[in-house]
């Protein structure tokens, strides 16, 4: 008999969670030796330990606004339609699933927030897992938030989001990060980590919670969460953001078939009322369908 797995997070490092799940599952099945991945606690060798020079801005009003989380599911066929819609010869010829979904969600988020007449500019933050980008320095079993997080999109509430352009900007930011890492070829782990940490701090220092409203879309897609077996079969359903600790966070996970995407969207309650009625969003996503289908 299979069971579901519920994972809560605070923009947690997906690979760390995945590594733990695989190890726990192997131990539950009575497997030993190489089957159990030993976690490596050496993240401080990459990113500098916390100190006064490496402090991110804190939102004093965080968790003081009533918020709600809802699940939106994009089937494989709807994802193909969305990727076609997001395709543009002038921008990106073939967007990824995550790029397409992120762009559509961002458009709907901006439209929902504009009804509140908030004067703040809206910014989209997208954490990026660094392990597959620097595999020679960052093993899969390295425990810690080994990611790069930065503002990838910014817009005033008077502007309109174009999905094709949003996809292009998402791709551009990803390429920029890859170029930074490539330019550091041959550098030590700590040197690259310090450079990326300083780059993140520089980006965040230009923001103020008084003038900017941050939204985060993070992806756990392509992680083998549905492959975890504790001895009684694979999970029926994996949920990634059912008890959010931060405001305005969206988590993307693969559907069980590995082809669709489930989006767990957390927004202020007032924004969610408008967001969940967005006609363009509902043309591609179903709201909280049964997890057993």
Image (cartoon, grey):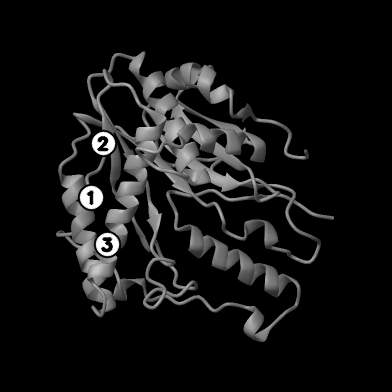
Image coordinates for residue 217, horizontal then vertical, percent = 42, 41
Q: Is residue 141 left or right of residue 261?
A: left
Between the C-alphas of marks 2 and 1, the distance is: 12 Å
Q: Is residue 120 left or right of residue 67?
A: left
User: Mark 2 touching mark 3, by CB under 8 A?
Assistant: no
Between the C-alphas of marks 2 and 3, the distance is: 35 Å
Dot 1 or dot 3: first in sequence order is 1
Q: Find residue 11 and name its label.
A: none
Q: How many marks?
A: 3
**What residue is pinned by disc 1?**
56
Q: Residue at x 43, y 38 (%)?
A: 249
**What residue is pinned by disc 2?**
60
Q: Residue at x 27, y 62 (%)?
A: 179
Q: Which one is closest to the eye, mark 1 or mark 3?
A: 3
Element type at mark 3: helix
| Quadrant location, the N terminus | bottom right
Tell me the quarter of the picture where residue 29 sits: bottom right
Q: Is residue 60 left or right of residue 103?
A: left
Image coordinates for residue 247, horizontal then vertical, percent = 39, 35
**What residue is pinned by disc 3?**
179
Q: Residue at x 74, y 65 (%)?
A: 230
Q: Nearer the viewer, residue 192 or 246?
A: 192
Decide: is 190 above or below 89.
Answer: below
Decide: is 222 above or below 281.
Answer: below
Q: Is residue 122 left or right of residue 207?
A: right
| Quadrant location, the C terminus | top right
Residue 75 in sight in this render: no
Image coordinates for residue 100, horizontal then vertical, percent = 48, 39
């Amino acid at each position: 008999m299979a069971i579901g797995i519920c994972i809560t997070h605070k923009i947690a490092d997906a690979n760390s969670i995945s590594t733990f799940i695989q190890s726990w599952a192997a131990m539950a099945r009575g497997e030993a030796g190489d089957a159990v991945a030993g976690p490596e606690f050496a993240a401080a060798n990459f990113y500098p330990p916390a100190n006064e020079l490496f402090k991110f801005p804190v939102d004093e009003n965080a968790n003081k606004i009533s918020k709600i989380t809802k699940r939106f599911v994009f089937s494989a066929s709807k994802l193909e339609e969305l990727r076609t819609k997001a395709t543009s010869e002038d921008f990106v010829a073939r967007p990824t699933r995550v790029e397409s979904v992120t762009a559509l969600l961002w458009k709907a988020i901006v439209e929902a927030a504009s009804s509140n007449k908030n004067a703040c500019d809206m910014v989209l933050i997208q954490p990026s897992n660094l392990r597959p980008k620097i595999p020679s320095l960052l093993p899969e079993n390295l425990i810690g938030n080994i990611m790069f997080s930065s503002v990838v999109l910014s817009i005033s509430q008077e502007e309109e989001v174009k999905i094709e352009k949003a996809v292009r900007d998402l791709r551009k930011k990803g390429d920029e990060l890859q170029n930074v890492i490539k330019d550091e070829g041959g550098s030590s782990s700590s040197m690259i980590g310090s450079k990326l940490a300083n780059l993140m701090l520089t980006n965040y220092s230009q923001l103020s919670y008084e003038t900017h409203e941050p939204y985060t879309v993070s992806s756990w897609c392509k992680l083998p969460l549905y492959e975890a077996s504790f001895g009684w079969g694979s999970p029926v359903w994996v949920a990634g953001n059912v008890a959010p600790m931060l405001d305005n966070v969206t988590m993307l996970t693969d559907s069980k078939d590995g082809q669709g995407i489930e989006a767990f969207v957390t927004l202020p309650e007032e924004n969610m009322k408008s967001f969940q009625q967005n006609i363009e969003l509902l043309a591609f996503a179903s709201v909280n369908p049964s997890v057993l289908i």
